[in-house]
Image (cartoon, rainbow, N blue to C red):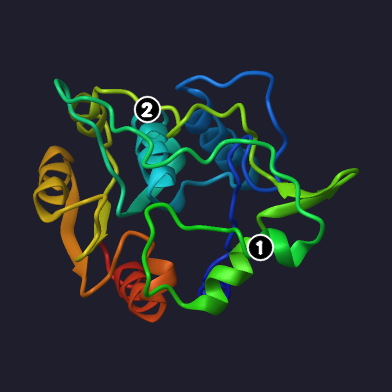
Amino acid sequence: MAPWFTENYRVVAMDLSGMGDSSHRAQYDASTPSGDIAAITEHISQSPVIAIGHSYGGSRLLRACSERPELFQRLVIVDSYVVFEGESLPSEPIKVRGNHQYPDLASGAARFRLIPAQADAVPGLVEHVARHSLRRDAGGWCWKFDTSLPPGGAREADGGRMLARVTRPVDYLYGELSVVVNRQRAERIVQALPQARGPIAIPTGHHHLMFDQPLALISTLRALLATQP
């Protein structure tokens, strides 16, 4: 999606520790992802940035902004689940752990799966991400992510207090058919934020909006970024 925004913005896409092309850590805790976001933001810009986060990345971005609001100009959060006080932490949908080895890139990419699954994802987009999710090692091809990452990611159950500390403007988007964030959850998140617009539903979109509604998502983001929150 980045090329659709580079004409008007300097676009930086980050991989959290233990994910994508970032290095692995000896250990991870609940503060690691938000710390990563704050550190890279300080590194790339001397002024507050516009930050966009999807799913787990969005909830970690909200945490980072609650702790370091001076680093951010505004946020756009896309289909991100927030756990409120008194709720149980969501469980990982299926077990996806293990250092699987594949003889070649194509066979590894063929095993790539979206979690949660969505049958209407654009095949070419899924294949593109799948191929960039693997790396070559001495034994063949394996996934880039660190298998010692906490299952489901580092989460905490103080969402209400955390959102109340997010003092920057936030636009909140979600997929109309998402199985991760329903309308009720989206409204509760928006209501807990001091400065929020939304929730804005992407029609017929699922959780992984960039895979099934890429043009609708790009158009919505462009429109939001062109207006003052």
Q: Nearer the viewer, mark 1 or mark 2?
A: 1
Is residue 66 left or right of 24 when viewed as pictured? left
Quick check: can you spot residue 7? no
Q: Are marks 1 and 2 in contact (CB under 8 Å)?
A: no
Q: In percent of the image, x 36 and y 42: which residue is there?
A: 93
Name the residue tied to disc 1: 109
Q: Secondary structure at mark 2?
A: loop
Which residue is found at the position 44% from the left and 27% from the top? Answer: 154
Instruction: Identify which amino acid the numbered label 2 is placed on.
Output: Arg
Residue in the picture at 29% in, 65% down: 206
For label 2, count other residues whose C-alpha is less than 10 Å away and answer few (under 14), some (14-19) or many (20+). many
> Where does the image place residue 184, in percent across and percent down from the top left?
8, 49
Percent x, y of residue 108: 69, 58
Between 213 and 138, the one lying in front of the other is: 138
Whether residue 66 sits left or right of residue 30 in the image: it is left
Q: Determine which of the numbered discs, if any, sits on residue 155 in the image.
A: 2
In the image, residue 23 lies at what x, y percent?
72, 36
User: Dot 1, how many residues are within 10 Å of its Cα: few (below 14), some (14-19), or many (20+)?
Assistant: many
> Is residue 59 depicted above or below 164 in this figure?
below
